[in-house]
Amino acid sequence: MLVLKFGGTSVGSSENIHKVIKIVSEISKKDRTVVVVSAYGGVTDLLLKAGMLASEKDDSFRNVLDEINERHQNSILDLKINNPEVIEKVNAHLHTLEELLKGIYYINELSSTTIDKLSAYGELLSSLLITEAFNVNGRFAVHKNATELIKTTKTSGKHQVDFAITTKEINYHFQNSTAAITIVPGFIASNNSNEITTLGRGGSDFSAAIIAAALQAKELQIWTDVSGMYTANPKLVKQARPIQSISYQEAMELSHFGAKVLYPPTILPVMEKCIPIVIKNTSKPEDVGTHIASESSGQNPIKGLSHIGDIALLTLEGSGMVGIPGISRRLFETLSNRGINIIMITQASSEHSICLGISEPDADLAKQLVDLEFENEIALHKIDPLTIEKDLAIIALVGESMKNHQGISGKMFQTLGKNNVNIRAIAQGASEKNISAVIKKDDVKKALNVLHERFFEDQRKQLNLFIAGVGNVGSKLLEQIKQQKSYLKEKLNINLRVVGITNSRKMLFSEDGISLKNWQESLAQSEETADMEQFIERTKKLNMRNSIFVDITASDLVAKRYASFLKSSIAVVACNKIACSANFESYQELKQLATKYNAPFLFETNVGAGLPIIDTLNNLIASGDEILKIQAVLSGSLNFVFNNFSKGESFHDVVKQAQAEGYTEPDPRIDLSGVDVARKILILARESGLILELDDVINRPFLTEKNLQSTDVAHFYNTLIEDDEHFQQLVEKAEAQHSQLKYVAQLIDGKPSVGLEIIPQGHPFYNLEGKDNIVVFYTKRYPEQPLIVKGAGAGGDVTASGLFSDIIRMRTY
Ligand code: ADP
Ligand code: ASP
Ligand code: MG
């Protein structure tokens, strides 16, 4: 004998019912089969909704009723059911359902007995229709109502299965039946007055287990919409995968802690009889699914992760609790007397406080009850009034052999801490089958994903990128990421995904990663208009692990938001120089936040695009070297201008050409005034350990007063023509000395400066070409022969590759 249970989604449509018929037909060729079915997917919810509306005297319950009617009438048509007896039974059920709802509407009340009666219609209807569908398809099946098989009694306000009578009834029926296939409605039962009762939401799994246990079935198969019990809820953790083999105990822990795929009470009856449970996917019957038995196999001591949402944490504390017996007993009794279930308990060894996790909807009542129970102690200040924290959740790590492995909880808490998930309370049973922690509800998805990554994903790290500014440099970066994606996966174990992008017109998000093959079209077609505030908020709200915000804008507003990213443990990679060259205090704050929240703040491209200048400097300092002097040429635009400017030529024309070829900012004054280079040397000075402001950078301008006072770009160009003589003098002087003009940044004796210099032949700066940058570090270890970094210091490709290196650095955090 085999017992198969098909859930709501498996019988949600006639297409799926046909899959069920096929599966059962195959199996029943070898074994007698009991098929337990749920209500059509969503119907139980609709029934309860209609009941609520009716009890609130809301006429719209009729619309919900119409929807229920329609679902079942359509099913009759789709399944080609024309047996008048069955149709009449279905219509009779639908009619009594309508009468029941009208009654609820009339008396304005919905008792628990009525809720049972009402919610039973889902399974009553589905089981009749499915039985007939078998017959229509030439597979003879018999319908047996579960109310005649499963009997309940009421204990502590809850229906409990009376196993003795139930086992007798089930055996009696099946001993007297020869049917190869028997269809039984799940979820429903009856009490000793023959009134309909139910087994709790998700209870069809339990019905099937009860029948399997009573019949000593060979196997209990739970057929659902996923291919087994997963390492974590597959809706929340994309990388989760089915667990092949798991023990009853482990499955029980996972289901108690929220793995909805199996209703928790299901396991006990079959475990007692050592009947294996197999969880299978109705749409993919070829998948092996999960095998649940006394022993589990597999190397990983951790079997899965799960969570329960909507948790409130109650804390009872006070000096009067220490050493006084009976406080916990009174606390637990107070709650259990009113049916409040305690999900988790932790008590500090000082006995100064007890922390309980309960379901959030029970929290306010719990406070009333507990404060009343400890009224006297509270009045005497021996105990504080109960405190409640809401919006929490419990996450649990489950695995029976965790007890044989050291350091698992350490890894768990380290992983959560690194990702800025704050832990409010921890519980670990003495059996060590489960370690659970209370965290903020908003952190659940991130917590499950980082833990999954840590314990199940071969140490592959997923990095999630949010890129602001996908113009020239941004596009190049995306192109490079696309090309490197598989290399990163295979060689460095990094799964790099772009989750959000924005340009000045549109923004686009995809939690599963934006396809980089056609991101331009997807962005252009996105319904979301660009809004930087929104982009920033969404990035934070998604709360994904290993998030990296990449700033390729030149926006002041964006730079101001770095602190809030870092506080949310979102790393920042910026080519925008504003944050690092703003006032020292905010630069320092960002660095401190990066350390505190373990979220790197990286800005290699602020100086010399992709050249490893800041990295080299950081490494020198970190290894104990000391900077004595820095000399550098750091402006591709000024380099271009002075490389192309020689005696007799118009300085104006050279600057115009530089702008036309894209070497300068749209406003060339930003480059020519030296401000941009001043920012860069300031950043190098700060990274060398100096506390300096932009005003401390001595700027010796080579432009004339008139150039500097110009009102706009056009005016500026005019003044260049007017003052051409000044520039001719500059170049003549250099040429007379067989030297070159270079715009040089220096840091000497802790003082940064920028200005135009005459560079003689033989100097490392003399032969600097086009957009090349060069930085010469004189340090304690390199006092005479300096350490030189030289190469292309501007351009989309190299800047993108500098950003890319900063992103990859995240893998070690
Ligand atoms: P059915 O209608 O078949 O009873 P349920 O909706 O009750 O199905 O249970 C299946 C669902 O449980 C899956 O679709 C999945 O979203 C959810 N689920 C939660 N945690 C897990 C887990 N660890 N493994 C598998 N499924 C899970
Ligand atoms: N139909 C019931 C519910 O939705 C029972 C079940 O499907 O397991 O809760
Ligand atoms: Mg279920």
Image (cartoon, grey):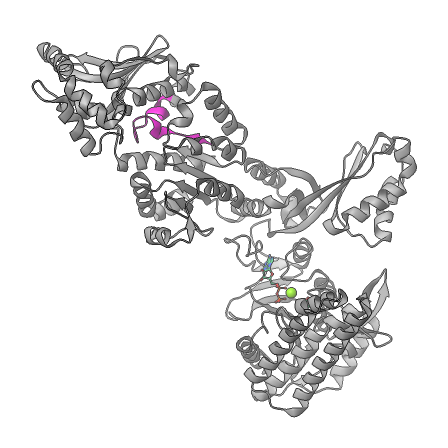
Residue shown at 72%/45% (left/top)?
312
Residue shown at 65%/62% (left/top)?
262
Residue occupying the far top of the picture: 749
Tell which quarter ligand 3 is in.
bottom right
Residue 156 appears in the rendering: yes
Residue 767 appears in the rendering: no
Observer-nearest of 385 and 544: 385
Q: Height in image: 550 above or below 523?
A: above
Horizontal and vertical percent position of residue 189 = 77, 73
The quarter holding residue 436 reads: top right
The quarter holding residue 22 reads: bottom right
Residue occupying the far bottom of the picture: 84
Residue occupying the far left of the picture: 648
Magenta span? 600-617
Horizontal and vertical percent position of residue 354 = 79, 38
Q: Is residue 92 left or right of residue 77?
A: right
As for residue 513 lying within the magenta part, the answer is: no
Residue shown at 26%/18% (left/top)?
708
As for residue 616 lying within the magenta part, the answer is: yes
